[in-house]
Image (spheres, rainbow, N blue to C red):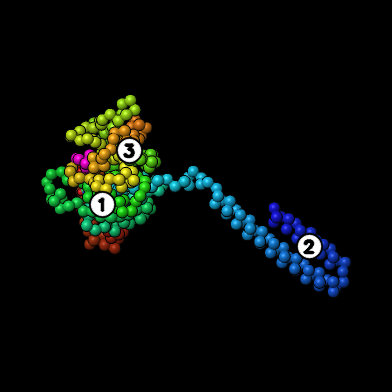
Amino acid sequence: MCMYVCIYKLAINMKTLYTGIGHSNSSSNSSNKMALGKSIKMYLTIFIATTCIYMVLYQYHMSRQPLASNDVVKPPLYIITPTYRRPEQLAELTRLGYTLKHVVNLLWLVIEDANKTNPLVAHTLDRIGVPYEYLVAPMPEEYKATKRAKPRGVSNRNRGLDYLRANASEGVLYFADDDNTYDISIFEQMRYIQKVGMWPVGLVTKTGVSSPIIRNGKLDGYYDGWIGGRKYPVDMAGFAVSVKFLHERPHAKMPFKPGYEEDGFLRSLGPLANAEIELLADQCRDILTWHTQTKKNPPASPVNFTRYGQTNLEFIEKLLVRP
Ligand code: UGA
Ligand code: MN
């Protein structure tokens, strides 16, 4: 408003001066010109000063505005993904990564069962563009060597827990295997878990699903194809834990016990009353995560460079993950 008044005054002033010029002699002509120059300078200064004040007031006004709902900072999510070297590895991480890309305020902890990181994995993670930490945690030799079932992804997940104990204070952690399938709405629901949250998982054993049983609005046992004496017969994809609660249980960890990883970890979080377990996915009436499995592919055969030297295959060869 003030700006417009100034411009208006300047216009009037200029009009007066120019009208004056027409009726005057040469000496008053030059003094008129000087007056005009002075006026322009003065009004320009007023104009710039007003603009600056206006900008400062606008900034102040904006800083006092409550954040729009989209800008409200949501509790962080820590997604712990065990992974290991195999032909499917980059495809699995790519698919999961682009799912996670739809989720805000998330840190993806990609932890490989290996002694050193693989630049191909790092390159894939960079390309996806989800904030991540890429760490390694090899399976102990005694388990690697066994002919029996191996505790897959356990050292990786325990490494993820150590990372959170050292680096996180709030939010929620979730173990997302690299080969499973996730509806992104489950991530928005799990953010607000106070202690532990659970929900159904599709495609688990021949029963087809693993789920908490809810009777009269309360947790009343578990539906799963294999109970195996477990207190918590749930799938890895079917629960999440608050970081604050993890801090309250400094000794909680996952055991190297095939089939009992979930049960062992959840027990180690005790004491935990059933009533404290939050039931997500519409009170466990919906399926938002699936325990999918990718067909195993044979390792790629070596490219014959006598035949394909000096072609694009020289580049592609470097992108293949061989066991
Ligand atoms: C099921 C469970 O969902 C797993 O959480 C559990 O660790 C596993 O069984 C088990 O009891 O051994 P499943 O689909 O059968 O999972 O196993 P994978 O998908 O082969 O492995 C689970 C996770 O561990 C994956 O993210 C995978 O990348 C990783 N993994 C697997 C390793 O880090 N190292 C391995 O040698 C194998
Ligand atoms: Mn799997």
Tell which residue pokes out farthest to the top in this image.
Answer: 216
Question: Along the horizontal axis of the image, is 251 left or right of 72?
Answer: left
Question: Residue tagged by mark 1?
Answer: 159
**Mark closer to the chain start, 2 or 3:** 2
Q: Quadrant of residue 34?
A: bottom right
Q: Quadrant of residue 227?
A: top left
197 inside magenta stretch: no
- Secondary element at tag 1: helix
Q: Which residues are magenta?
A: 259-264
Question: Residue tagged by mark 2?
Answer: 14
> Would residue 291 be seen by someone viewing this image from the given angle?
no
The answer to which of 25 and 198 lies nearer the viewer is 198
Q: Position of residue 111 (x, y in %)?
A: 27, 52
Q: Residue at x 23, y 52 (%)?
A: 113
Q: Nearer the viewer, mark 2 or mark 3?
A: 3
Q: CA distance from mark 1 to mark 2?
A: 76 Å
Specify the amino acid type for callout 3. Gly
Question: Residue tagged by mark 3?
Answer: 197
Q: Nearer the viewer, mark 1 or mark 2?
A: 1
The answer to which of 19 and 88 lies nearer the viewer is 19
Q: Quadrant of residue 229?
A: top left
Q: Residue at x 57, y 53 (%)?
A: 60
In the picture shown, does residue 132 fall above or below 32? above
